[in-house]
Image (cartoon, helix red, strand yellow):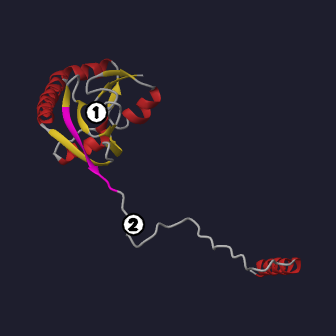
C-alpha cells in the first residue's frame, strides 16, 4: 500500500516521503495515529501545497543537526568503569552507556544512532564514536574510558578462609560397630523418618 508520511516515523521516513508499506501496517498503525495518509491524487495535491512548509522543516532540522554536530565534536566524554590491573573492564561500555553520559551533559541522542566499534568497548583507552545525526550528517565523539581498579577484599589475619565442608578427624580408638548395632541404628532412623 502506498502512503505519504504526515510526520516523521522512525525507521520509515520523514514528513512528505512517499513509502510503500504493508496494508496491515498502514491500516493498523500509520493511518489511525495520523502518521500517514493514503497516496492518491487528492493527497498528492495536498502535499504540493505544503511543500514549502515541509522544506522549511527539513532545513530547520539540518541547521539543528549542524549545531548538534559542533557541540558533540567539541565535547570529550570520559567514562570510568571497574577494571582489572591489565586494563580489561569488568563489563562493557555500550551505546546506551554513552547515551546516558551525553544526556548528563545536556545532549539527548537516541542510543540507536550511536555506533561503537565492535558494538561494545571492553578495555580502557581512547576511542572515537560515530553518531548519526540528520540525513547523512555524522559527528565523531571523543570517548575516554578510564579504569577504576577493583582490589579483592582480603580476609582479616585472624580469620581463616571458610571451607566448604569440615570433617571431623577419625579416631583409631573407636570400637568397631557390630551388625546388631548397625541394624538398630538403621531401624531408629527409619522410624524417625516415618514420624516426621
Magenta span: 141-151
Would residue 177 appear left or right of 103 to someone viewing this image? Answer: right
Pick the front one: 131 or 195: 195
Closest to the camera, between mark 1 and mark 2, is: 2
- Left or right of residue 80, residue 37 in this image: right
In this picture, is 194 found above or below 116?
below
158 vs 61, left or right, is right
Give the residue drawn at x 16%, y 45%.
106
Across and down, in percent, residue 60 comes to 13, 29
Q: Which residue is mark 1?
A: 113
In the rendering, which numbered label is found on residue 155? 2
Question: Real-space Cα distance between discs 1 and 2?
Answer: 46 Å
The residue lying at 24 percent from left, 37 percent from top is: 125
Decide whether the magenta segment is chiefly helix, strand or loop: strand
Label 2, secondary structure: give it.
loop
Q: Give the image location of residue 24, x and y in percent.
A: 46, 30
**In front here: 185 or 67?**
185
Amino acid at each position: 500500500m502506498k502512503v505519504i508520511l504526515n510526520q516523521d516515523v522512525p525507521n520509515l521516513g520523514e514528513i512528505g516521503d512517499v513509502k510503500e508499506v504493508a496494508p496491515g501496517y498502514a491500516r493498523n498503525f500509520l493511518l489511525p495515529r495520523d502518521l500517514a495518509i493514503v497516496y492518491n491524487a487528492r493527497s498528492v495535491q495536498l502535499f504540493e501545497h505544503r511543500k514549502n512548509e515541509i522544506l522549511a522543516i527539513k532545513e530547520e532540522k539540518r541547521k539543528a543537526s549542524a549545531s548538534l554536530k559542533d557541540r558533540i565534536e567539541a565535547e570529550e566524554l570520559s567514562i570510568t568503569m571497574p577494571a582489572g590491573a591489565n586494563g580489561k573492564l569488568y563489563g562493557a561500555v555500550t551505546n546506551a552507556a554513552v547515551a546516558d553520559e551525553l544526556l548528563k551533559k545536556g545532549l539527548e541522542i537516541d542510543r540507536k544512532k550511536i555506533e561503537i566499534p565492535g558494538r561494545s568497548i571492553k578495555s580502557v583507552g581512547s576511542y572515537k564514536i560515530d553518531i548519526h545525526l540528520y540525513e547523512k550528517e555524522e559527528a565523531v565523539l571523543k570517548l575516554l574510558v578510564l579504569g577504576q581498579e577493583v582490589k579483592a577484599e582480603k580476609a582479616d589475619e585472624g580469620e581463616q578462609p571458610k571451607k566448604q565442608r569440615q570433617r571431623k578427624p577419625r579416631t583409631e580408638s573407636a570400637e568397631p560397630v557390630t551388625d546388631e548395632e548397625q541394624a538398630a541404628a538403621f531401624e531408629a532412623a527409619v522410624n524417625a523418618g516415618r514420624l516426621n
